[in-house]
Structures are given as structure tokens and as C-alpha cells.
Image: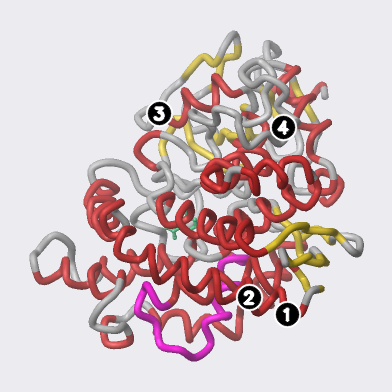
Amino acid sequence: MGEASLKVGGNAPVSNIDPFSTAYFDDPYPFQEELREAGPAVWLSRYNVWAVARFEHVRAMLFDWKTYCSGRGVGLADFAKETPWRPRSILLEADPPQHGRARTILNRVLSPVAMKDLQDRFARAADDLVDTLLERGTFDGIADLAEAYPLSVFPDALGMPRENRHFLLPYGNMVFNAFGPRNELFHKSVENAAPVLDWLAGQMQRDQLAPQGFGAEIHAAVDTGEITAEEAPLIVRSLLTAGVDTTVNGIGAALYCLARFPEQWDHLRADPSLARAAFEEAVRFESPVQTFFRTTTRAVRIGDVDIDEGQKILMFLGAANRDPRHWEQPDQYDITRRTVGHVGFGAGIHMCVGQMLARLEGEVVLAALTRKVSRIEIVDEPQRRYNNTLRGLAKLPIRLQPIH
Ligand code: OVV
């Protein structure tokens, strides 16, 4: 504690909590409470970075992109001091004005209007999958539903070839681990993803993508001069990276919530128009994307804590989404809650560009369940999946009771 206190000039609370440890992942909530209670900004002595875990301050950081930049990376590594481990994302790991050019393309490709065209196809795929799963009765809610569903619709919407789509999972798992420290989790996920790297590089290229789909639409922006031919594959890469593991954990979160809280499931069945709200509340409650870093572009004061320029600050989206200073009964999953303002999708200029697609997927899966299923039972111990950024399960053994 002494050393860290000196480093930060003595006016800041210090914590040795490790937010990238299995003890933390197993039960993050007491740690998150400790961080929120310690102060508006807390020095994490294990990593020499700052933590911000209160809703008010996380939200303010997300909106203030000038002070809290993304261009130096949104992971622990500071791109001003070390070369990024992969060519950096021109969307996620960029600031205005570069960020805006890539963002404009994806805003269009993933717009609410574009989502409307997908609605029927996505809803049918959800219905078909739930029918198949009901025939089986007992299955793994993660592999067989939370993973199977996005893999059945997202690569098609992107225009990917049929083969090897499940390779997106180890790739995403690695990238989300890479935002954290170079711990064992990271190294294992790199090993796991090594066989799919060449495949993934191919999937970004124009000639690999169907003439209709998100990928083709991104590459078409080269023809209009909006982006360069070098930028287009990188923007496709952002979708390949962030488009599957996130929705897998979002759908997994909703399923886990509805299985654990049967009165909420009953409420949803009684009013299926709440499907979208039930998904949104699951995103708040579980916060599938738990954390991202920013880097300070100037000396700042958060609350009464002074922070230098060039400091990494870890934003605890999950802790903010359960901050009792903002939320009533934050630890309750309540599908009738007003979730507006939650930071599960971030906020500000970097707020999740795929949020409409995520909500569409979540909504149609939950709606399909309400039409066909009377009860979701957990039949064996769920297993957690450890990731430096993503929160979710590796296994959720469930049984669905059909409505007869
Ligand atoms: C939001 C997100 C997560 C991971 C990767 C990317 C974006 C990217 O742009 O590559």
C-alpha cells in the first residue's frame, strides 16, 4: 500500500483487488462494491492503473472522449508506449476524426432500418432453433442456444461463407482477453485461437464476402471514396471480432436470468411484449462486457482524486450498472425496470454500434421461448467462462418444458 500511495501522491484510495482473477470472476460483486465505496477513483496497485466503478463517473468518462481517449488502446496496454499486439481497430481503438469515418459506415450498415430487413429472417431462425431444442428437452443453454443462435444468423447477415463459422468464437475470446493483462487466461486463449488466425484474415477480404450483406456494404464504401481499400477489411474485422462473443454472452445472460428467476419468466410469458426489456435488463444485470480502459489526455480530477495525463483508467461498466447510488435494488433482475442510461453498451461516441442487432437477436430468442416454453429449469451446475473482459457461462445445463 505504501508504494502505491507514494506513486499517486497520497490523496487517492488504493486497492489490491485483481479484476482479472478467477476469484473476481467467480463473484465480482463484493469486489465491485469495495471499489465503488473506496472512492470515485481508486488506484489498482497490482496493475498501476486507476479504477472507476461508480455509475456517475463511468458515465461521465464515456461521454468525455477528449479527456479519456481510446486511441491509446482500450485495454491495459498503452499504445503510446508499446506496439499493439495486432493492427489496432480503426473503430474501437481510435479517436475523432478517424473514428468518425469508420463509425459512419457501420452506423449505416447496422442502422435500425437495416435491422428491419433482418427481422423476419432472424425471428424465423429463433423459432426453428427453439423447436429443435424443445424436441431434445435437455441441453446446454450456452453451446446449443446462446452460441448456436448468433452463429446461425450473424455470419449470414455478414455474407460469410458457410465453412468454419464457429472459428469466430475462439477469435473473439482471444481479443476480449487481450484487453486485460498478459495472464494465463490470455496466453491460453491465444493458443486456442492460433489455428483460426489465417482463416480470419481471409474473411475480411472483399472477394470472400457475399455480394449482399454487411461485409459487402462496408467494402462498397471504398468505391464511394468514404474509406480506403486498406480500411475496409479492418472495419469488417471489427464486426467479426465484436459481433458474436458479445451477443452469445448477452443471450446467455438473459437465459441464465430467466432460468434463475422464474417469477420474471412467468411475467414475461404473461406479457411477451416485454421480451426486448427482459433482454436489456439482462445486459444491465450481467453486463456481458464488464470493463474497458481509457487513457487520460490531460491531468484530471475525478471527485477529489487527482490523476495525471497518460494514465490508464479501467471503467467498471458492470459495477456502474449495479451502483446503488443510481439504481434501486440493483441486484434484482426486474424486467419491468427502467433500464435507460445503463452502460452495458457503453455510452457516447463509442457506444456499441451493434446494439440494435444485439437487441434484435435477444428479443427474437426470448419471444420464441415465450411462445413455446412454459418453464426453464437448470438441471445441473452452471460453469463460468473466464475472460478478462467478458462475463458469461461456459455451460448452462437446462431443460425446457413445452407449452402443450
Ligand atoms: C467493441 C469491440 C470489441 C472488440 C473488438 C472491436 C470492437 C474491434 O473494433 O476490433
- The residue under label 3 is 63
* Residue 170 visible at all: no
Observer-nearest of 395 and 46? 395
Observer-nearest of 394 and 261? 261
Check if mark 1's residue and mark 4's residue have beta carbons within 8 Å.
no
Q: Which mark is residue 277?
A: none
Mark 3 secondary-structure assignment? helix
Which sits earlier in the primary sequence, circle 4 or circle 3?
Answer: 4
For the residues marked 1 and 2, what is the alpha-carbon distance in whole angstroms? 6 Å
> For this view, does 402 lie left or right of residue 346?
right
The three-letter amino acid code for the residue at tag 1 is Glu
Q: Which mark is residue 131?
A: 2
Q: Measuring 65% from the left and 64% from the top, which residue is drawn there? A: 372
Q: Measuring 74% from the left and 58% from the top, which residue is drawn there? A: 374
Count the marks.
4
Mark 1 secondary-structure assignment? helix
> For this view, does 100 lie left or right of residue 249?
left
Q: Which mark is residue 135?
A: 1
For the residues marked 1 and 4, what is the alpha-carbon distance in whole angstroms? 49 Å
- Stretch in magenta: 156-174
The x and y percentages for residue 280 are 55, 42
Q: Measuring 62% from the left and 77% from the top, which residue is drawn there? A: 193
Check if mark 1's residue and mark 2's residue have beta carbons within 8 Å.
yes
Colouring style: secondary structure
Main secondary structure found in the magenta portion: helix
Residue at the limit of the structure toward the front, as seen here: 404
Mark 4 secondary-structure assignment? strand
The x and y percentages for residue 140 are 77, 71
* Residue 298 visible at all: yes
